[in-house]
Image (cartoon, rainbow, N blue to C red):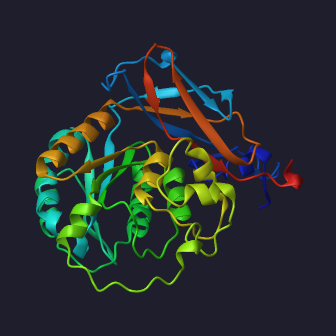
Amino acid sequence: MNMSFTRRSFAAAALGAPLVAQKVPLATAEEAPLFRAFTRQVIAPTTVTDRNGNYIPNLQPHEFRLFDKGKLQKITIENASVPLSIVVCIQANNTVESVLPNIRKVGLLLENTVLGEAGQAAIVAFDHRVRVLQEFTRDGDLITKALNKINAGSTTAAMVDAVNDAARMLSRPSLKTHKKVVLLIAETRDKGSQGKLRDALLALQFGNISVYSLNINRLVTSLLTKQPPPRPPSVPSSARHVPAGALNTPDATMAFTGHYSGNYIPVLVEILRQGKALFVDNHIEAFTKHTGGAERSFLTYKDLERVVQDIGQEIQSQYLISYSPSTTEDGGYHEIVVEVTRPDMKVRTRPGYWMAAIPDHLK
């Protein structure tokens, strides 16, 4: 049977939102061939706080405005009643051995403050391996049992690979209507992943997944970890501004030599545009800012308890704004801006998504 695609179908092949196939029914077997059109739905998890940082959970749909590439969109909004699926990715290499006893205690915190009545969690540990210690479950005892299995491993910390695997777990069709979150408990830098940051970011984008982090303090772990003898640097200090293989553009030079600051969108566009690996000092910052999530840090168990509770409150107070973009023919990066009509409100959401360009013969 012949098959053709509309121009809209190719635009919907953008990396950043799920595709929904819609069949046009045939009247008879002899009539026109089957056409498939695709519509794209973008989901923008959105957090709203007042000037004091208190979450605002009861805003009405008419109080939101969302712009895609500067164009006002027609939106729908859901709130915390949407079931939550969360993958907890925990760094389990030799450098975090001193903090693992505290991390093993987060099971009860997750159950009481994050998951809610209908939430479910999966537990993943990573060093040079990525291990699923517990598939999705609502059973707090199983979550705690999985956490107690975590032991310090090798010197590697394949964070990007772990996030990639978590994104695949959360992209299962059965979770399509869920709010989807990756919770990273890790140091801020990847050590030895096989996959690329760009691919992990696109997987999160395509799955409409938010990333939150509980950052393990690098200073504490470096002081408490036995360090191997230092090796001489393979790259002279004068050449460390941008790594070998990266394009030496002003954006790359400024963005990849340290932590991000100011407008994050140029940094994100550089990551998504370039196929080669780029040096990123803080992988967690890339994941959280790309997806509209947030970073938290902890030193003690009391800190950990506080930040888990805060993340749980934010997730449960969040709004899921969804829309089908009216700007379907423009390739490249689509910036998302969400505004609230009430005064003195602060709004945080994913900054945008990447869309493939339409070939000339389909225009």
The residue at 51%/27% (across/down) is 76
Q: Is residue 125 left or right of residue 265?
A: left
The residue at 64%/69% (across/down) is 246
Residue 85 horizontal/vertical position (percent): 32, 48
Q: Is residue 58 left or right of residue 22?
A: left
Q: Is residue 58 left or right of residue 67?
A: left
Question: In the picture shown, does residue 319 fall above or below 283?
Answer: above
The residue at 25%/69% (across/down) is 222
Q: Nearer the viewer, residue 253 or 149?
A: 253
Residue 45 horizontal/vertical position (percent): 45, 37
Is residue 38 visible to the viewer in this orientation of the structure?
no
Question: In the picture shown, does residue 295 fall above or below 77?
Answer: below
| Residue sitting farthest toward the front | 238
Q: Nearer the viewer, residue 12 or 331?
A: 331
Q: Nearer the viewer, residue 251 or 97?
A: 251
Residue 232 horizontal/vertical position (percent): 43, 86
Q: Quadrant of residue 325?
A: top right
Q: How many marks?
A: 0
Residue 156 horizontal/vertical position (percent): 34, 77
Quadrant including the N terminus: bottom right
The residue at 38%/61% (across/down) is 166
Is residue 195 visible to the viewer in this orientation of the structure?
yes
Q: Is residue 123 left or right of residue 111?
A: right
Q: Quadrant of residue 292?
A: top left
Question: In the picture shown, does residue 155 fall above or below 362?
Answer: below
